[in-house]
């Protein structure tokens, strides 16, 4: 019948048009910001699977993006499942690089041994866990003891001024990462005294740092913590609280985190690269690039870069070169 | 002369074999639906059984704290708060969707001119075709800050049940309106005319005659809308929050079963841990609840269809 | 006063009283109903205005042809998401058309209603239409992404999952379309010596084609906006490349990209999310227009 033939032709044309647009690969990110020293001019291709800490994720994503400007055929996927979950996948051989906001732990080392995964620990950047509050909630500085009274497992205060009458008369409402997060591990270890335990009431946990920021941003009296870069990205919507680690109130900033004066919440950020993956040229190329360009990448992703000394050590960790 | 029966035999010609093969092929396609249901049941049950190896059934069914993603001592797998939050969000949604939906349906069926009906009914169906992620966006970026916190000045948290629930209601409204409208329109005109003849006003006819006559279909519409609301994921995921609790406070965050499943699957916990297996246990619970609601709805539809035949 | 006049006076009093009070109640009732309609339409209007105002400024050809970016949101675009979505829709269509039509043909033309297995199939389809999309995601994760099909979180897995989700829609609509073909067509064909299958293939299906096409587009419209099943099977929320293969490459799709954008609290990313929503709605609009066009053009008048 005529009608069905015409109809079939129309459908076929539609399908062809759809596949036509799909087949056109291109590269429209023509803003080359991180120019600088490019090394291997040989085109590489392949896939790199990166997963792990959501604190390191902005760095890894920025590194992947800028690396793609030099090597557009290397497909890099970056996930943010959390330091703990990242290590699980990494030690099972499912990822090539594991982002971590704390060093690898005993049981994870065991798991990697079991999974036959050998790795190199590469220090890639620095971070300071930033305690943030809603814009309307003015808290200038908190001591580590006060933080424990707010976030700790035995915390009882329902309003901030119960801890110190100078603090605002607002209900305590906290947003924190969950147990899959290295940030959570680090914070609870340093502040609450024991890794993994935290206040239960009035706390909303999320594996998504963006969700934490959204939650705090929209509620007067809300407080939480995450990596410095997330504060930097949302500076206009959140307040950072100065932390008194025993030597006076210190404001989190690139300077204080890098030189370590932002105590006790400054920490190194790592990428753990499996030796097997490192043998592939595209992975080696990427890791070399990330370390060599770490200053620019860190600035682009609002993460605190390494000092020259730290960068030198990192280069050695991945076998000199660069 | 009669033809003896035993000479009439079926001939297996190539044509007949071809036809037979086609029938088998078509049956196989139809049987895929059975395979799908079987697949769903197996997928859910298999891991749910594994889940109950790690977490005792009594803790799941009767515990009153739902914090599966917390660490150590604070981890708890009592599903009641999650079911409560789900029903709470659905209830808020229905409070919005049922009156508005029925109001629209009665207006469309009884009061609207044919021209008005032609314009309004498709417009409401447009609402039904909008992807749910758009509703999630609407709830988070408009309803919460501009309407609830801004226009009404309420003190709700960023992720709150009221915003998610109201938008859930808007999402479900077209379903209820459309099905209720079908039920009302199906009421024979003779019933209306008889009532008018006895001197009833239009209001009385709509409310006291037509609506009760269509009640089975209307209930079916509401139950189907509820079923849709119970299983809705994205709106709650984006705007409802991460907490399942027994707090009866619409300003607080609430998460329903479907959003919990999606959120847990996204965060990629280890695939053999109890946390991960909650996806399947909760999935089974959700599947059973929606199945139950669906059967109730079908029962009502069958009843209302029979009334006029 | 005569008896008739008295009665008339009484009647006037009754009718009059009813008129005044009842009229007010009647008008209030109608106003109440109308306000329901107005509220529903207002919600729709607010939704559209919100999305257009937030995202309109970000729409551009560059937006459609760049990849998403966390680092430089000014250059972010949704190309990978559009490509993923188009691929998904193509694959879903290839899956649901034969399977859906075959099922509908079987149920309408071949199945004996009295057999228990046929009634079971019908009941099944009705139930499957009401299962939440998240559960289909679990199904896809359990059997398609993992064993036995073990495809991984690739386009084919996503397409099969979404296909199963919308299959009931296609089956139900196709059945209506096939049912609408009058029996006289079939009988005439059979009388001329055609087999059952020849009748179906040459007479019934072509006649049901517009209805089937509408059903397919309805199903695709539903599938294109589904987020939850794709999240559960592990599709990427953020990909800076177009998928290269259907079976060997991770992918993203518009609803997922939208979700990723709006999860970020910054206004910049929210606007990008709104713009991506407009792209999605645009594709939906085109699809539904095609459906309406096909339905009007090829509508069969029996």
Image (cartoon, helix red, strand yellow):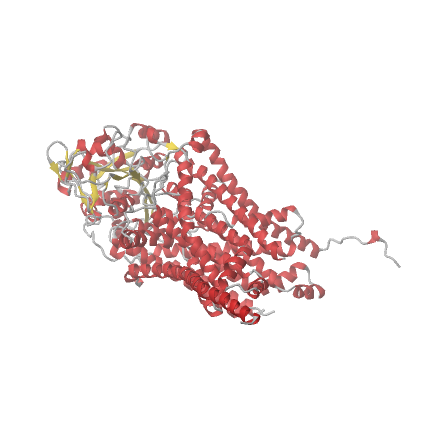
Q: Looking at the picture, does residue B55 appear above or below residue C107?
A: above
Viewer-side residue, A184 vs B98: B98
Q: Residue furthest right?
A: B1
Can residue C262 be seen in this snapshot?
Answer: yes
Q: Looking at the picture, does residue C9 appear above or below residue A82?
A: below
From the viewer's perspective, tell me whether residue A205 is left or right of residue A22. Answer: left
From the viewer's perspective, tell me whether residue A252 is left or right of residue C149. Answer: left
- Residue B169, image x and y in percent? 41, 52
- Residue B118, image x and y in percent? 47, 67
For the image, the number of numbered tags is 0
Q: Looking at the picture, does residue B196 appear above or below residue C152?
A: below
Can residue A41 be seen in this snapshot?
Answer: no
Viewer-side residue, C35 vs B305: C35
- Residue C244, image x and y in percent? 39, 52
In the rendered image, the quadrant that contains the N terminus of chain A is bottom right
In the rendered image, the quadrant that contains the C terminus of chain A is top left
- Residue C278, image x and y in percent? 35, 60
């Amino acid at each position: 019948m005529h009608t069905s033939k015409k109809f079939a032709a129309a459908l076929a044309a539609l399908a062809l048009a759809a596949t036509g647009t799909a087949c056109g690969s291109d590269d429209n990110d023509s803003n080359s910001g991180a120019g600088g020293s490019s090394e291997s001019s040989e085109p590489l291709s392949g896939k790199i699977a990166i997963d792990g800490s959501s604190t390191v994720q902005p760095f890894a994503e920025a590194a992947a993006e800028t690396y793609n400007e030099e090597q557009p055929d290397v497909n890099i996927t970056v996930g943010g499942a959390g330091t703990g979950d990242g290590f699980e996948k990494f030690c099972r051989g499912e990822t090539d690089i594991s982002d971590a906001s704390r060093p690898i732990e005993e049981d994870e080392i065991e798991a990697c041994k079991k999974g036959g995964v050998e790795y190199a620990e590469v220090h890639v950047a620095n971070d300071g866990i930033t305690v943030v509050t809603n814009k309307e909630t003015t808290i200038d500085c908190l001591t580590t003891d006060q933080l424990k009274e707010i976030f700790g497992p035995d915390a009882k205060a329902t309003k901030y001024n119960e801890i110190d009458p100078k603090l605002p008369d607002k209900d305590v409402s906290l947003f924190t990462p969950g147990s899959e997060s290295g940030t959570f591990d680090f914070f609870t270890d340093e502040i609450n005294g024991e890794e993994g335990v935290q206040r239960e009431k009035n706390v909303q946990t999320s594996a998504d740092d963006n969700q934490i920021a959204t939650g705090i941003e929209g509620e007067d009296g809300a407080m939480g913590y995450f990596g410095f870069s997330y504060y930097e990205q949302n500076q206009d919507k959140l307040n950072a609280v100065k932390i008194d680690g025993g030597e006076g109130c210190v404001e989190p900033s690139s300077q204080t985190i890098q030189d370590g004066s932002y105590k006790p919440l400054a920490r190194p950020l790592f990428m753990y690269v499996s030796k097997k993956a490192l043998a592939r040229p595209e992975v080696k190329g990427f890791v070399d690039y990330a370390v060599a360009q770490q200053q620019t990448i860190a600035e682009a992703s609002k993460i605190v870069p390494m000092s020259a000394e730290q960068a030198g050590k990192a280069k050695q960790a991945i076998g000199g070169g660069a | 002369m009669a033809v003896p029966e035993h000479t009439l035999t079926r001939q297996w010609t190539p044509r007949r074999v071809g036809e037979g093969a086609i029938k088998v092929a078509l049956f196989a396609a139809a049987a895929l639906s059975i395979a799908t249901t079987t697949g769903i049941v197996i997928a859910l049950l298999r891991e749910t059984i594994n889940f109950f190896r790690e977490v005792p059934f009594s803790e799941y069914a009767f515990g009153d704290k739902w914090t599966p993603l917390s660490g150590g001592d604070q981890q708890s797998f009592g599903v009641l708060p999650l079911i409560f939050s789900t029903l709470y969000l659905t209830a808020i949604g229905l409070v919005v969707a049922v009156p508005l939906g029925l109001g629209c349906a009665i207006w469309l069926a009884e009061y609207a001119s044919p021209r008005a009906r032609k314009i309004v009914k498709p417009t409401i169906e447009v609402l039904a075709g909008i992807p749910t992620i758009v509703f999630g966006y609407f709830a988070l970026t408009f309803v919460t800050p501009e309407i609830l916190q801004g226009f009404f000045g309420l003190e709700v948290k960023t992720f709150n049940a009221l915003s998610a629930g109201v938008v859930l209601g808007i999402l479900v409204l077209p379903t209820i309106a459309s099905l209720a409208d079908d039920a009302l329109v199906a009421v024979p005109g003779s019933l209306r005319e008889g009532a008018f003849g006895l001197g009833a006003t239009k209001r009385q006819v709509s409310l006291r005659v037509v609506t009760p006559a269509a009640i089975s279909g209307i209930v079916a519409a509401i139950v189907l809308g509820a079923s849709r609301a119970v299983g809705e994921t994205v709106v709650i995921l984006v705007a409802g929050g991460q907490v399942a609790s027994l707090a009866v406070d619409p300003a607080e965050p609430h998460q329903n079963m479907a959003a919990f499943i999606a959120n847990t699957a996204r965060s990629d916990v280890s695939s053999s841990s109890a946390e991960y297996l909650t996806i399947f246990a909760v999935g089974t619970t959700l599947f059973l609840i929606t199945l139950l609601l669906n059967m109730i709805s079908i029962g009502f539809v069958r009843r209302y269809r029979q009334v006029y035949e | 006063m005569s008896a008739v006049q008295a009665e008339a006076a009484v009647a006037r009093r009754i009718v009059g009283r009813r008129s005044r009070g009842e009229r007010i109640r009647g008008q209030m009732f109608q106003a109440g109903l109308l306000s329901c309609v107005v509220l529903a339409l207002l919600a729709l209007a607010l939704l559209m205005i919100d999305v257009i105002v937030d995202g309109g400024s970000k729409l551009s050809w560059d937006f459609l042809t760049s990849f998403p970016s966390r680092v430089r949101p000014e250059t972010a675009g949704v190309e990978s998401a559009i490509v993923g979505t188009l691929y998904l829709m193509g694959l879903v269509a290839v899956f649901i058309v034969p399977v859906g039509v075959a099922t509908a043909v079987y149920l309408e033309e071949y199945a004996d209603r009295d057999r228990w297995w046929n009634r079971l199939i019908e009941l099944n389809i009705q139930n499957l239409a009401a299962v939440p999309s998240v559960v289909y995601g679990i199904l896809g994760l359990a059997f398609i992404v993992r064993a036995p099909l073990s495809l991984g979180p690739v386009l084919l897995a996503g397409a099969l999952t979404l296909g199963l989700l919308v299959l009931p829609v296609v089956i139900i609509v196709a059945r209506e379309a096939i049912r609408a073909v009058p029996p006289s067509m079939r009988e005439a064909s059979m009388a001329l010596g055609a087999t059952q299958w020849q009748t179906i293939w040459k007479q019934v299906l072509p006649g049901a084609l517009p209805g089937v096409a509408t059903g397919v587009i309805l199903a695709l419209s539903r599938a294109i906006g589904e987020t939850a099943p794709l999240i559960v099977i592990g599709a990427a929320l953020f990909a800076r490349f177009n998928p290269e293969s259907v079976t060997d490459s991770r992918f993203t799709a518009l609803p997922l990209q939208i979700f990723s954008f709006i999860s970020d609290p910054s206004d910049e990313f929210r606007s990008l999310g709104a713009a991506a929503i407009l792209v999605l709605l645009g594709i939906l609009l085109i699809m539904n227009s095609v459906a309406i066009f096909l339905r009007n053009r090829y509508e069969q008048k029996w």
